[in-house]
Amino acid sequence: MAPRFILLVICSAAFVIAIIPLTSSSIGRGQHQNMQVLKPNLSDSGVGLSASSRYEGSSSFVHVRYHMGPVLSSPIVLYLIWYGKWNPKHQSTIRSFLLSISDESSHSPSVYSWWATTVALYTDQTNSNVTTSITIGREVSDAECSVSKSLTRLSMQQVIANSISFKHLPVNNRNGVYLILTAPDITVQDFCRAVCGFHFFTFPSIVGNTLPYAWVGNSGKQCPETCAYPFAVPAYMTGATKEMEPPNGDAGVDGMISVIGHELAELASNPLMNAWYAGDDPTAPTEIGDLCEGVYGTGGGGGYTGQVSSDEEGRRYNLIGKNGKKFLVQWIWSPVLKACSGPNATDRDN
């Protein structure tokens, strides 16, 4: 059975969201209750919803509720912190994915439609949807590792503080999101053992402001079989499951992209840990990415990624971004369908 991931919260002086590998095929827990009806603010430009079997994991036992907190409805400005030494080609691939989220012109199945038909359907108290506008505001390189080559969850916030105090990045309290991307040789507390990425918000005592941020690590050297699945598989699965060819030729980077999508989706819908999540305990929420971990296409679930396309070189993908760039990104829980959903590259042939 393929490893899947669920969301955990680590409680201490500070708590953070982590992605931890499990082998369970269960996708949710809790009692069935009535869900708030959402009205998506989408045009009829091909980004639609249907009763198709493309939507997997439908369950009356999964109840994602709104807890009255904000969502990111204003256009998001991303501030990228490249921590450690990065290959410019790999940076370009990640940057292309981030810019593709708002690119309505991309060919179907597009990264834009993946976000617009799932994440953007979540609303706040004013019935404002999560934005579909994501831009990159500024980028900084911390190649010399100003904090350490071994980061903890708290020292991760010091990385952001340094980038701001050195005047490389502005303080954007209105719509800024700070994304820390660590290079393959950077170790992070619980990385590979229990964490592939997380999102939270900064503490004023460290950064001086409360700012939403996320971290994702490049697992290419440290644990591709854990955090870059399905481009690498654990040893116990060898023979039963064949690893997929990454769409951009690098398991660590292509694996990061799916985790980045997962974390940004959850951050946008639950930035302060009091908006959209399942479960009754706010210190241990299950968010909209966790419910669909490991599902990439039709038939996904129970250890099977689902049907995805392959290019002429055998590289696997389910989304297309700017300039025809291809990506393999997990599906997201839809508040309208109450199931995992996402554009599927094989839909073009249906």
Image: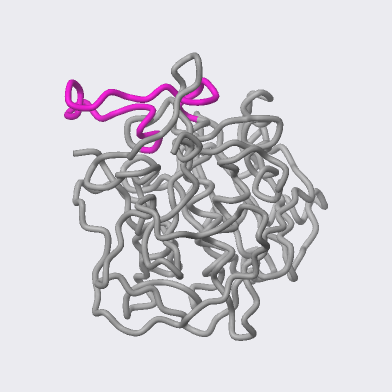
Q: Residue at x 44, y 56 (%)?
A: 332
Is residue 156 among the parts visible in the rendering?
Answer: no
- x and y percentages locating residue 50 in the rendered image: 46, 59
Image quadrant holding the C terminus, namely top left
Q: Residue at x 48, y 51 (%)?
A: 262
Query: How is this picture coloured?
Result: one colour
Does 294 lie within the magenta span?
A: no
- x and y percentages locating residue 22 in the rendered image: 24, 48
Q: How many marks?
A: 0
Image quadrant holding the N terminus, namely top left
> What's drawn in magenta, residue-wise?
227-252
Does 231 lie within the magenta span?
A: yes
Q: Residue at x 63, y 28 (%)?
A: 86
Q: Is residue 169 left or right of residue 27?
A: right
Q: Residue at x 74, y 57 (%)?
A: 77
Q: Is residue 37 left or right of residue 31?
A: right
- x and y percentages locating residue 107 in the rendered image: 64, 37
Most frequent secondary structure within the magenta stretch: loop
